[in-house]
Structure formats: structure tokens, C-alpha cells
Image: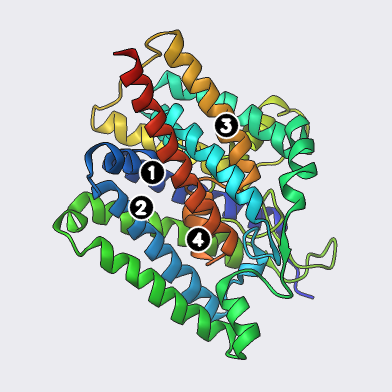
Amino acid sequence: MQDIDLKALATLVLWASFGLSVIFGAIAQRTHFCTMGAVADIVNMGDWTRMRMWVMAMGVAMIGFNAMVALGWVDAAHSLYGGPRFIWLSALVGGALFGFGMVLASGCGSKTLVRIGGGNLKSLVVFVVLGVSAFATLKGITAVARVATVDTVAITFATGQDLPSLLAARTGVAKPVLAILLGLLIGGGLIAWTVSREEGRSGNNLLAGLGVGAVIVGVWWVTGRLGYVAEDPNTLQEAFVATNSQRMESLSFVAPVAYSLDWLMFFSDKSKLLTVGIVSVVGVVVGSAAYALGSKSFRWEGFRNAEDTGNHIVGAVLMGIGGVTALGCTIGQGLSGLSTLSLTSFVALAAIIAGAVGALRYQVWRIERSM
């Protein structure tokens, strides 16, 4: 058996993940990449420009991930999203809660980190509340409720729930072949839609779509290829170093926020180690702050009044509970999960958008009622 320096490998994985996250944060700050904003632009103004950013990133991530599957570098079954258990109700309920919450909190988990980097103190409060509610839903009081209710409803497949695995089992066609075909077909179709209009071909849209999508693929490669150990010398089992889930991961910003708070609060506990999720949270803030300071767009911002504070706190709670229940956020499920072509990710994404639209309609109703 080849000797492996796991500590050195973990350090390399962490630095690579941090660097990619810095790039994500800088791109998001530069281009105003925001899922909540994209949905709000459509609902309030009929403007699809920012939605084209997100959709292009989806397409790039799909093609990149499934190209790696075809090459034999990664496998969706090694992720949280590609397992055989299709938790459709958790995805529906959690996604809707997250979508509603991100509107109240002025942005999803990634946007919260980007806004912190730009000097937004409201987002710092959202970060803390989101992290606490997420941790409670991972291991605390809301975790008990989650496990006893929505998580009990599931469909278990004989194979993984990603589309290439499901179709391979039914057709007999090799999974790598189906992965690249589906990745190119669905991902390519999404990219073609984004560039079919002039606004989709703007510099910002191309930077955000291509850049964010490439970062998602990059983190998959770092954790699933670079950080993969076929036989851990300590356990004699395969391992993915420096990940909280002990599987390969890409970017997601709900559970990692909880793990970041846990690491900060129990820093002296030597069992609390840095992970890809934690350094990614820090990386996005650093990247955003670097661009904001360099472009002189950094500015401090606080709450307007008690109602504004309350909305952000409630939104953060809903995002923490919903994001963990749905196994991800607009980035975790909407990009990382969707790139694996997981059924749960498709359901979670639809529920997140529906929840966001519901919250935007609710805000309009409240404004009209107060007039």
C-alpha cells in the first residue's frame, strides 16, 4: 500500500477550496450574482438578466461534473445528492422554507457572505442566526422534528438517484456514457437559453455564469479527485479528506455556516478540524471584501428599524431550518446538487423558487395593505 500523508493532503485540499471560494466571492461581488435578486427581478420587473447568470452557472456545472464522471474521476454516488434515497418531501418542505426565508433575509446563504464582505452588518446577524438554526436542524431540537416527520417519507431506488444511474439501470447503457450525454444535452441547453438573448451575453453574465459554474466544478474536483483516498491507512476504507460529510462535496452555504460557528466556539477542542465547508465560508467573505475594498464599493450598512430586523431574523431561521432539511441552498442544491443530475436537487430547486415567489408576493400584499 502506498504511504499517504493525509495531513499534507488535507492542507492542500483546504487551500485549494479556499482559493476557489475567494474567486466565487469576488465574482459574486463584482457581478451582483444573487439568486433571490434574480427571482425578484422577474417577479417585480419581468427582467430575466440575473436569472440567466444562475442558469448559465447550472449548465456549466452540469457539463463539467458529468464530464468528470465520464472520465472516471468522480461519481455522484460519492456525494450527498446521489444516494439511493429520494427524500422528495424534505426537499419540497425544506426548499420552500429556504426560498421564503431568503427573501425576508435579503439573500441566500452565499449572498449573506458576499454582503458581509461588502460591509453589511445586517448580513452578519443573518449569518449567526442562520448558523444556529442550521446546527439545531442538524443535531438539535429541529433535527428531532425533521427526522420524525418529513425525512420518513422517501422513495428508495436500487441504484443512485442521479439520472445517469437511474437510466443506466433501465437501459443497460454505461453510466459514464449517459452522464456525458445528459450533461451536454441538459447543461448545453441551459447555456444555449442564457445566450439566446443579448443580456445573457453581457460581460457580467458571462463572467458570473462561466466563473461560478467553473468554481463549482473545481471544488468537486478538489474533494472528489484530489482529496480522494482509495484506502485510508487508518481505516483501510476509501475516504474523502477534509469534508464534513466524509463524502466529496462542492460549495453549499447552510450547514457549512453552522460548522463554521461550531469551529469558532470550540476552537480549543482539538477534535474540531477545518473542513472544506468552513474554509469556503471564509473564502467567500474574503473574496467579496477584497473586491469591495479594491473597487471602493465597501460601505457599512445596518438595519433600518425593528421590522427590518425582525424580517431578517425570521428569514435566517427559515433558511437554516429549510436549507438543512432540503440538503442544500440555492448554491448547494441549485448548483452543486443539480450538477449531479440528482432528482432531489431538481425538486429542492423548484421548491426554493416557489418559496421565494411566495415571499415576494407576500411582501407586495403587505405593502398594498398598508397603503
Residue 318 has which mark? 3
Provide residue 171's location: percent of width, then percent of height.
60, 89
Per the model, the C-alpha gap separating discs 1 and 4 is 15 Å
The image position of residue 37, as x and y in percent, is 33, 38
Mark 3 near mark 4, Cβ–Cβ under 8 Å?
no
Tell me if I can see residue 57 in this picture.
yes
Residue hosting label 4? 338
In-front residue for pair 319/278: 319
Q: Which residue is drawn at 47% across and 62% down?
A: 217
> Splitting the image into 4 quarters, where does residue 131 fall?
top right
Residue 177 is labelled as none
Disc 2 residue type (three-letter)? Trp
Of the residues shown, which amino acid type is indicated by label 1?
Answer: Thr
Q: Residues within 10 Å of mark 4 (few under 14, many from 20)?
A: many
Disc 2 target residue = 54
Q: In terms of sequence position, does the residue under pointer 3 or pointer 2 come before the other?
A: 2
Mark 1 / mark 4, whichever is N-terminal? 1
Q: Earlier in the sequence, mark 2 or mark 4?
A: 2
Give how far across and how far down residue 134 sits, in percent: 64, 34
1 and 4 marks in contact (CB < 8 Å): no
